[in-house]
Image (cartoon, helix red, strand yellow):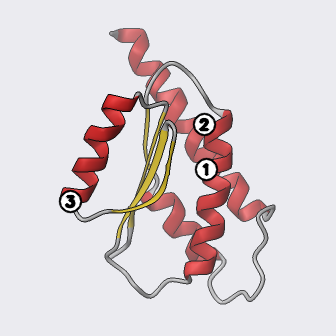
Amino acid sequence: MENKYILLANLEVSTKKVYEKHFESEKYEILVNNENMIIAKQTNNKDINLEHEQIIIEVLESMARKYTSSKVLYIDLTKDINSILKKIEGEEIVRHTDNRITWAIRQAITKAIASKSDISLFD
């Protein structure tokens, strides 16, 4: 089974506290917890390269900061991050600027924002 990754951005303080308690009760590990963003992971597979995962999370955090809006952004990145980890598996050196990482993360964030915009048009 794969690890599950969740990104929540543009959170208000009270909403953020609710999600922190939820992730704690569901046994998620919070990888990033800054002013208005949470990136959490639920571990199902311990056989991953943690250094590679950390690089991916740093790129994700950096990109998510650039996509600020007034709406809360909730993205399930399970498929995307696990796919990236499989692509770079076995490599010694992985850089933050690697296209396999940056492109996939940018696509996932853009797709989530676009689908959220589509939904709000019909509300």
Q: From mark 2 to mark 1, how far is it between C-alphas? A: 14 Å
Q: Position of residue 2 (x, y in %)?
A: 37, 73
**Residue to which mark 1 is pinned:** 61
Q: From mark 3 to mark 2, how far is it between C-alphas? A: 27 Å
- Along the viewing direction, whichever of 79 and 55 lies nearer the viewer: 55
Helix, strand or loop for disc 2: helix
**Residue to which mark 3 is pinned:** 26
Q: Position of residue 49 (x, y in %)?
A: 56, 83
Q: Is residue 36 left or right of residue 61?
A: left
**Residue to which mark 2 is pinned:** 110
Task: Point out the image quarter for the N terminus.
Answer: bottom left
Crowd around label 1: few <14 · some 14–19 · many ≥20 (10 Å): many
Position of residue 35 relative to residue 12, above or below, is below
Earlier-in-chain disc, 3 versus 2: 3
Look at label 2 and name its amino acid: Thr
Helix, strand or loop for disc 1: helix
Look at label 1 and name its amino acid: Glu
Q: Position of residue 24 (x, y in %)?
A: 25, 58
